[in-house]
């Protein structure tokens, strides 16, 4: 009697170990067969956006230093001009379009079908939410990836985002 009870317990233990092993193998197989994750793609897009912010424009702020896109975003929000009396928003717009055209080709021959770039200034006091610039091209359907960056500006923050559509 004691012998059969021990055998039943061992058999039950073996069944549990086999089930756990099968579930572990299935879990491992599912995780190893995943394609490139959207998280990794978003990190790549975040890196692109960070580099974009540091890109130097042809706008000078003090007759010596050329401003980068991050600085021009603040100038555009404040409606300031470059020292050459060129409109900072116009320079920002044209520079971004040139960069996007060179680095993100669109069309049926490419994976990328469209993009949307937007920069918005927001503050709590006074309550303000103002679009600084919005650029889009191509066709954005339901599949996309998105990255955002932030810049401190005056008493608020500039949120800039890039959405790539597939």
Image (tube, rainbow, N blue to C red):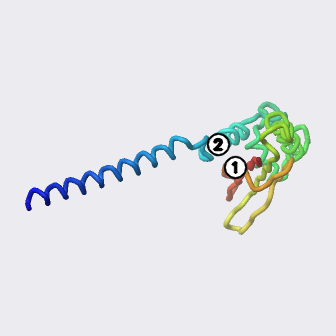
Q: Pointer 1 and pointer 2: residues touching (CB < 8 Å)?
A: yes
In the rendering, which numbered label is found on residue 41?
A: 2
Identify the element where label 2 is drawn. helix
Give the residue drawn at x 82%, y 47%: 114
Q: Quadrant of residue 15?
A: bottom left
**Where is 123 relative to 38, above or below?**
below
N-term-proximal mark, 1 vs 2: 2
Q: Please tell me in which quadrant of the rendered image residue 86 appears.
A: top right
Residue 149: x and y, percent?
67, 49
Q: Is residue 6 left or right of residue 94?
A: left
Q: Is residue 123 above or below residue 24?
A: below
Q: Is residue 94 visible?
A: yes
Identify the residue shown where x is 35% and y is 53%: 19
In this orientation, which residue lies closer to the viewer: 156 or 42?
Answer: 42
Q: Quadrant of the N terminus?
A: bottom left
Residue at screen point 78% across, 49% down:
117
Name the residue tied to disc 1: 145
Towards the viewer: 90 or 164: 164
Residue nearer the viewer, 162 or 55 = 162
Residue 25: quadrant of the picture: top left
Q: How many other residues sit within 10 Å of disc 1, few (<14), some (14-19) or many (≥20)? A: some
Q: CA distance from mark 1 to mark 2?
A: 8 Å
Q: Secondary structure at mark 1?
A: strand
- Please tell me how crowded label 2 is: few (under 14), some (14-19), or many (20+) other residues with Cα within 10 Å: some
100 vs 85, nearest the viewer: 100
């Amino acid at each position: 009697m004691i012998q059969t009870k021990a055998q039943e317990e061992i058999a039950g233990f073996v069944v549990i170990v086999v089930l756990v092993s099968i579930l572990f193998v299935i879990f491992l197989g599912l995780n190893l067969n995943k394609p490139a994750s959207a998280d990794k793609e978003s990190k790549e897009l975040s890196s692109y956006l960070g580099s974009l912010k540091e890109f130097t424009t042809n706008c000078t702020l003090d007759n010596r230093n050329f401003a980068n896109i991050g600085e021009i975003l603040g100038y555009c929000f404040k409606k300031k001009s470059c020292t050459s009396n060129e409109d900072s928003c116009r320079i920002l717009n044209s520079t971004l379009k040139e960069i996007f055209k060179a680095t993100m080709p669109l069309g049926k021959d490419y994976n990328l079908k469209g993009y949307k770039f937007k920069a918005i200034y927001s503050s709590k006091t006074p309550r303000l939410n103002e679009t600084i610039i919005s650029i889009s091209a191509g066709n954005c359907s339901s599949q996309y990836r998105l990255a955002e960056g932030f810049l401190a500006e005056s008493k608020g923050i500039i949120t800039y985002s890039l959405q790539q559509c597939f």
